[in-house]
Image (spheres, helix red, strand yellow):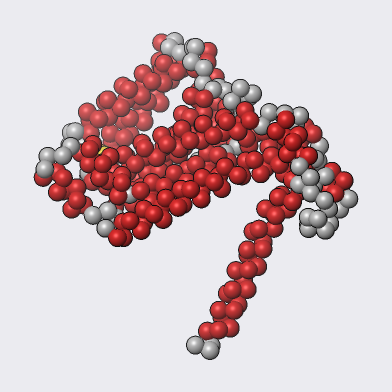
Amino acid sequence: MKRSLPLLFIGLLLCLVWLVFIAAPLWWVLITAFKPPTAVNQGATYLPFIDFTPTLKAFREAFSGIRGDFFGPFWHSSIIALTATFASVLLGSMAAYALCRFQFRVKLLSGFVFALLSIGGFFVVTEYVGIPIPQALVLTLVISLSVSLVLNRFALPGPQLGNDDIVFWFVSQRMFPPVVSAFALFLLYAEAGKQGFQLLDSFTGMVIAYTAFGLPLAVWLMRDFFSSLPIEVEEAALVDDVPRLRIFFQIVLPMSRPGLIATFLVILAFVWNEFLFALLLTSSKWQTLPILLAGQNSSRGDEWWAISVATLISIAPMLVVTLLLGRMMRAGVLSGSIK
């Protein structure tokens, strides 16, 4: 016991050092938001009412609109992030549940046929038939998917892919550099705009993009949560002729509430802080907070008090959501342990 005390002290000391290292930037942003311009420019000051006199001037300027519209990007970020996160968690949970409770067998040859028909068919219908790119994309995907599903029913040669392989395929979508996907989406949205489908700088376009890139993470996380649930409850419901869809929404989802909340928080943080897609896919109508923050320094110089206020405005909602959902998650864990 005596030998463990020095190790405990060293561990506590390292944790305190790490806490200071993490909290120092947040403290700097917080106090800078309350500094007058003279206190920022005169040098490093860290203690309110000792090194400088706090003021709310930067907050008044931010909320009055003198330094740009904060409410518009804040509303855009909120509605886009919540909608895309909800869609990702809902669709990802349904896919993850299917991958936990059903066995899928995808023949590799049918997958190869799907890739060949989708890529080759897209080239043919756009170059030789003259169908516009958005319509050609939908047409080739429907045809190639239908053909591959029919072929998958036959005894094709070659290996078969199981559930673990399908999950890996979902997760592998996040391995590509984001700039590649963002630029491809920009070109696709631009072509859709020529056909009358306005996706660039629109709510629909941003939600589709963020939902698509949140789905792999939702499938991966929720599959582990669903795998830990007792299957006997679902089997008892099936004996009573309860439909699978009702079992999923009324039994499985309530039992996996901590996992849903954790997945929701992870995807929400990704969407809320995402910069690259918002930079390429929006201009002014649906500009989000990260784009507004990036433009503060370049358009108005090194006015760190204003930049700090904008940073606090973007951080505060995530802190509130994390505290509220974290309490709900702990309540779900406790109620599950009591039951």
Residue in view at x 27 percent, y 29 percent:
148
Which residue corresponds to the image point at 52% horizontal and 84% vertical from the top-left?
A: 4
User: For this view, does 8 lie left or right of residue 302?
Assistant: left
Quarter of the image that includes the C terminus: bottom left
Q: In which quarter of the image is residue 281?
A: top right
Residue 34 in the image, given as x and y percentages of width and height? 76, 47
How many numbered marks have been drawn onto this rendered protein structure?
0
Foreground residue, 240 or 202? 240
**Rendered position, 108 above or below 336:** above
Q: Is residue 299 left or right of residue 18?
A: right
Q: Residue at x 53, y 88 (%)?
A: 3
Left or right: 304 in relation to 280: right
Residue drawn at 78 percent across, 58 percent down: 47
Residue 9 visible from this viewpoint:
yes
Does residue 127 appear anywhere in the picture?
Answer: no
Q: Quadrant of residue 307?
A: top right
Percent x, y for residue 235? 16, 48
- 304 and 187: which is toward the camera: 304
Residue furthest toward the bottom?
2
Q: Where is residue 52 in the image (x, y as percent from the top left)?
A: 83, 53
- When the figure is inspected, residue 12 is found, relative to residue 194, above or below; the finding is below
The x and y percentages for residue 103 are: 22, 44
Q: Is residue 322 above or below residue 249?
A: below
